[in-house]
Amino acid sequence: MKITALVYCENEFGKVDGKVTNGLLRNSDKYEIVGIIDSTKAGQDSGQCLDGIKNSVPIFQNIEDALYHLTIIPSCFIYGIAPFSTFLNIKERAIIKNAIKKGMNIINGLPEFFADDNEFVEMAKEYHVELYDIRKPPIRTHLHHFTGDIHALTTPIIAILGTDCAVGKRTTALRLVKALNIKGVNTVFIATGQTGILQGAKYGVAIDMLSSGFATGEVEHAILTADKAENPDIIIVEGQGALSHPAFTSSSAILKGSSPDAVIIQDAPKRKNHCDYPNISIPPLNYEINLIEAFSDTEVIAITINHEGMTDKELENTINEYEMIYELTTTDVLKYGCNKLIDKIIDQFPQLQKKYSDLKNHVNSKN
């Protein structure tokens, strides 16, 4: 059974910094999300608010409001914001302490580790709850150097990279993994950030908390471990940030560690500046594509769109424009699903065709 969880996302639900909550609501293999806390949207259905589709997961004013309306005390309280500031303020500390007093285990995705905070540790002991720091890196003896064994892997690897942070790379990756598995292609997901791990990914690590000496090796190790354990037909690796982003180096570790056979790039056409960096412009899409292909021995095979700020007509026109300009398959998986991407992947890796065809033939024979 999934673990019940209340997710804190004050003033950020549906926004860029609410990406942890947004992701958990769209897909969670580990947690049953029973409510969201965001006083600015209290009373609304979270699915309707996020994607226009009701899901009966309510948004509450605060913890007291949530526990008054819920029939249970959730097992966990998840801090579901990924803010630019990486430390809790006084108000947020009080909210975490309140959740501890209510008897909920605390799930923390910040790079500030609650299990190293004496006040939180003492309170957790008093109220018999646990503190889980999702982004805390493994101890040194459990870390892995890059070996180069990834280059001998015959399983196709696709990395889902992007033009900015919080642009939808993980969402596209998970939708694609699910769609490929439904089509009969055994697909494994490699998480590289806290949200993917929170969502229940079996393989991966939050690489932004690792030193540069181990980030590449941990990506490689996760892929090799998954390949040995699952014998997949294809592996999809979650991207982080953007290779061109001056503030982050995660994309370089992902490209080097995964040595992908192909890349799908996620773009938000209406976004002109990097999130949290309003004075830094996002380079043109062709610049990012060329940078990726120059940095790693791979090729970009498709573009996926984040439709934030776009009308349906603008999205349709952009897809047509991108396909004409870049001569690459382009789609928006939230609006149109993954069929175009799957067709491109099957075309790119013809060894997958048999698995895909076998399932179609099986379904047709049953009908």
Image (cartoon, rainbow, N blue to C red):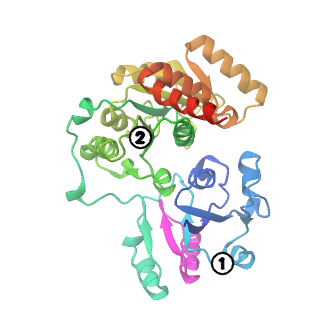
Helix, strand or loop status at disc 2: loop
Figure quadrant of the N terminus:
bottom right
Q: Nearer the viewer, residue 40 or 124?
A: 124
Residue carrying label 1:
72
In the shown orientation, is residue 201 left or right of residue 271? left
Q: Residue at x 35, y 32 (%)?
A: 155
Contact between marks 2 and 1 (CB within 8 A): the answer is no
Which residue type does callout 2 highlight?
A: Phe
The reply to whether residue 284 is visible in this rendering is: no
Mark 2 or 1, nearer chain start = 1
Q: Amino acid at mark 1?
A: Ile
| Residue closest to the eye, 115 or 7 | 7
Residue numbers of the magenta segment:
87-109
Residue 25 sits above or below residue 113 on the image = above
Q: Quadrant of the C terminus?
A: top right
Q: Residue at x 48, y 24 (%)?
A: 353
Q: Position of residue 204 (x, y in %)?
A: 38, 49
Residue located beneath label 2 in the image? 248
